Image: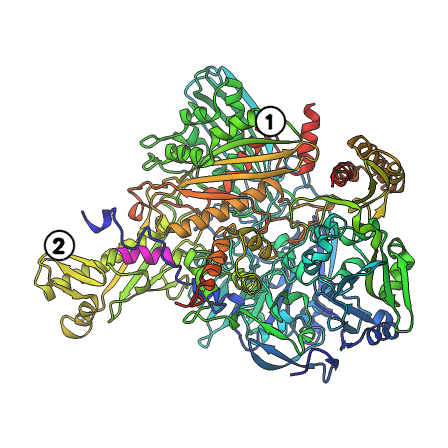
Amino acid sequence: MSVSDKREFTVVNHRVEKIDALALACGTAQFTDDLDIRGLLTGRILFSPHAHARIKSIDTRAAKKVPGVLAVLTHEDLPRVRHTTAGQGYPEPSPYDTLVLSEKARYVGDRIAAVAAETPEAAEEALSKIQVDYEVLPAVFDTMQAIAEGAPVIHDEADSKNIPDAQHNICAKFDFEVKEVEWFSEADVVVDQWYKTQWAQHCALEPHITVTYFDGDGRLVIRTSTQVPFHARRITARVLQLPLKSIRVIKPRIGGGFGSKQEVLLEPICAALTLATKRPVKIEFSRKETFVSSRTRHPFVLRLKTGAKKDGTITDAHMEVYCDNGAYGAHSLTVMMCSGSHTLPMYQAKNSRFIGRSVYTNLPVGGAYRGFGATQGFFAWESQMDMMAEKLGLDPIEFRKKNYIRSGESSPVFKAMGEGREGIEQKIGSCGMDECISRGLAAFRWEEKKKRNAKQAGVKRRGVGCACLMQGSGIPEVDMAAAFLKMNEDGSFNLHMGATDLGTGSDTVLAQIAAEVLGVTAKDMIVLSSDTDLTPFDVGAYASSTTFISGNAVKKAALHAREQILKIAAKILDEKPEDIDLKDGKAVGKSGRSCALSEVANTAFYYHDQHQIMGVASHIAQSSPPPFAAHFAEVAVDTETGQVEILDYVSTVDCGTAINPALAEGQNDGAVLNGLSYALTEEMRFSPSGAMLNASFRNYKIFSAADAPPFKTILIPTYEADGPFGAKSVSEIGINGPQPAIANAIYDAVGVRLFNPPFTPEKVLAAIRAKK
Amino acid sequence: MKNNIRQFCFPASVKEAAGLMNRLKSKALIAAGGTRLARAILPAVDTVVDISDLPLKYIKADNAWLRIGALCTIDEMEKSPLLARWACGVIAKTAGFGSNSFSRGMGTMGGNVVRAHPYNNLPPLFLALDAVVVGTDSRREKVLPFAELLKPEGMREFGSRYLLTEVRVPARTKTWSAASERLALTKSDWESYASCVVVVDRKGGVCRGGAIAVSAVIPRAARMARAEALLAGQPATEATARKAAAAVVAELEELTAGSAAKAYAREMAGVLVRRALCEAFQA
Amino acid sequence: MPQKKGRGTLRAVDGKLDILVNINGKAVAMKVAPGEYLLDALRREGYKGVKKGCDGGDCGTCTILLDGKPALSCMLFAAQVHGRRVTTIEGLGTPNQPHPIQQAFADVGAVQCGFCIPGMVLVTKALLDEDPDPDEGAVRRALDGNLCRCTGYVKQVEGALLAARRLRQPQGGKK
């Protein structure tokens, strides 16, 4: 068996210590703000206080006179280049509707002006002295009202591009239908339901932050907390009309992103201030600014009309989604499409129809957020599955098992709906769904809990619910990754890749993959990632692409280096290259003769046919093999207060081979807890004039260690032939389970179903009352 | 964050601290625990009077009173063996509601009580226990029933003229039955829909009297006098608890002018009071 | 080093206060603006392990130990720690010589983006100094002021309990 296809591993699938764990635990790992730069200016942005207003004029004269202020910029000072801030590959499938500084205020929190000053105090004073003459316009804050006739037109400018219907505030549109029989003609039951999900936020602990400066060669360096360094370079170059080669983007350690940093948010404006002042500038969002002026999870209004036969076969799936993008269209097409492309294939309905509209409103802007539309889609779908099962009189678990897509099966949705464009045809390779369900049921003690709950009485009622999920692993034929390895005299390697570690541990996971190929340990890999000067291209960390796509690029690069190593080892050991294996830092021949890798490297450097052993490779994928998951929730509902307590939660996930089981579990743990608070407590709230009311951790509730209920992650191993050493992906899928699983559990407990999360005590009690 | 602070004073005695407070008046910020005030400085403030060195950390009891020093942290109150035995441990239990590690470890009793926020836990607690607050202006000691501290004049006095030094709880409450309840989105959530503390003086199965204090629903913690009146002479049963709870909801309706936005919170206050009374009746 | 009692009065000279703080065992003289917060002063002095997550007392990433007790450096003025003992994450260990708590966190996979970890480690230290054998509930309660969005807290609690077990051993958890 070639090393590529091996199933027994020495490094992969081991709980290798994350290579930066100690540096992070000791506080020595450097984040964006941790580098002292001489002469650093403070950059600040002036945000609009109005949800919708024309800017008649901006007077910056008084602001410019404040001592210590070196630049004050408005849209009039910058090239008028419409773009999207969405960190996506070129050509970005989002409307080009954004300017670095807006020429019209489209939400409370929109960017109107920017200043750079010697001190934070001077910057603050300058902001207060900028005089903007606004003509306040009527605003619209409701998704459905925004597309109705007569709603205020938010993007009425002539120079924006790629907006399907600006007059009706539609920033993205997608329709798809596959029909084998007349709609609902074969259905014995039909369920038609509307759902509405809430505004939510990533809450990465490190706010958005960017530092820009000119290096000694006069090149613009952007040191930034980003998930997409290469997209940041390209978009900044285009927007500021700079040659791309004059820009270097460096990603240091990042304090989380979850999608909020898959956005070219601060880089252009910070760079513009450096260009204007010739000085280093730092823009660091406050927590409030992060809440209001970065990105959100798109709230969705969804309608699912589904039909099924008496025997439990789903026949019809009509899915209509209205995705609220807020004031600008970043990720409008892709998030909307993923709500269908990651859900519909799972249910294998004969007739499938998707009607998707992304909508502008005068509210904060939607962005990429872990789950990326599938979260909202699965809330609807997995709630609907329980409703259908009940109407059919079938067990909800058996009903699901009957319908879910399996290994070897395909769906027309795969080809019709990719992410922002047509997808690709694919068959499911690995699929651990059945085992996810069976292992999950057992670990959760589903049957036992159901039995016990059957005879319950009292004020607190218990219930159980489940939700099953799939996601994707990267965007096929779109996402590209590349890696480069060079060997050092002592048998260690420098591994350079564009792949972006935002705390996910990809540096470690990719080092493990390379180490597995080369027969060394992860500690023998010196990793450098995400520097546009020093590392080859990678689209960045999104779409659950890093392990599957960047991992394969790293694997190929390592194989390339391995080839060269074997050739030299063959000479040293007097064996054929195909008879030599690399293990424990040695080249070991069939004969038993061996030599250290350092001997191979030294030979290559100094003794014979001198050359640098280097591996280089790029990779794009032809498939996007889904991870699968099954979640189980037990709740106790206090019928007098409506409060929902989570008593137990089990999440099983099939990510193929877990390259690093500890990191994979950790990813899933974090995703699940985020999903739990998304189900119960998280919600961005707005005033009647569109200002966010709860822009702090105090008022926007995420769980603390004491709030976290008991829950656990179980990895279900499968082997995906297309993935590096069998791996798929794991980072997003976990967040999609809790909202539907808990909705289902609440129904099981008290017989009421909620369609509008978060399931706060007030809402639950009102539903219980309404039922009586 | 901009502020106009120019100097820091670290008084070594209560007298010195109170003197500073009176001399500087609105130009002084009295800093104790370090959990909230540092980010809410008024422009007039130019001096921080850091009182963390003062000898005001004690919890002790004599024949007349339980005395809690103003600089006791919430954590110290939670862990105090004396408080664990006082009125069914209600002080120890309630102090830590809706808190996190920092607000417990750094937050002080005085900080929780002076210019009290409706979400703070100690005001309804001390109201229910008929406590008094003690302060000094460096010459005279001032003792005020706790309810007075929550009125505008009391609030003005304590915080600008009188430095709060301790809270005293009458010794008679030591053997009373008590319970507290609170409803919030999460355990660590400082904001709550409603919170209440009930204290009951029982003999046999009959209430001789009681106190019901509610907070969060209303801007200032308050005693529910009409509901309390319904307890006197009544059997310590669920039926009594229900009647009292209904009276609490009615009283809160008045206090919140029937605001629809507060309907759920009012109803929950009733649920919490009923539950707390039932618990106290069984203690 | 001035005693805590009788720290007197600090008045600004040329707009700065002169304070003397014991930081990680070393007496450090600092010039701070009167209205400056401890978090900003520490970071300016080079203690970059103290993080700014919310600058408002809600997230715990700015945790330091003040006389051994966890405190939020964004909610204290720098001047308030004049004459007191401050411990930052830098005072515990280095990647080459990590403190057992830091090693335990790394060993169980509790570190993802790492932004919250210095705070978590310091709070764990304070907890174990006071209670060397806490149960899971006590650990969760101690950590409930340090928010994390990456980990779900699962492995951090494991890491704290592992550190406790190791520190209770005779060699004190040293490798």
* N-term-proximal mark, 2 vs 1: 1
Q: Which tag is nearer the camera, tag 2 or tag 1?
A: 1
- Answer with left or right where residue B81 lies relative to residue C170: right
**C4 versus A302 height, above or below:** below
| Residue position marked by numbered label 2 in the rendering | A578
Instruction: Point out residue A42 in the picture as x, y percentages from the top left corner.
Output: 61, 70
Q: Nearer the viewer, residue A706 or B174?
A: B174
User: How crowded is the residue under tag 1: few (<14 C-alpha within 10 Å), some, or many (20+)?
Assistant: few
* Chain ID at mark 1: A
Q: Any magenta on residue A514?
A: yes
Instruction: Point out residue B99 in the picture as x, y percentages from the top left corner.
Output: 67, 54
- Answer with left or right where residue A605 lies relative to residue A428: left
Cα–Cα span, label 2 and label 1: 67 Å
Tell me the quarter of the picture where residue A171 sits.
Answer: top right
The magenta segment: A508-516
Q: Main secondary structure of the magenta part?
A: helix
- Label drawn at residue B35: none
- Label drawn at residue A456: 1
Q: Secondary structure at mark 2?
A: helix
Q: Any magenta on residue C11?
A: no
Instruction: Point out residue B23 in the picture as x, y percentages from the top left corner.
Output: 88, 75
Name the residue located 49 percent from the left edge and 33 percent from the top edge: A467
**B238 versus A589 height, above or below:** above
**A144 versus B26 height, above or below:** above
Both labels 2 and 1 in a single chain: yes
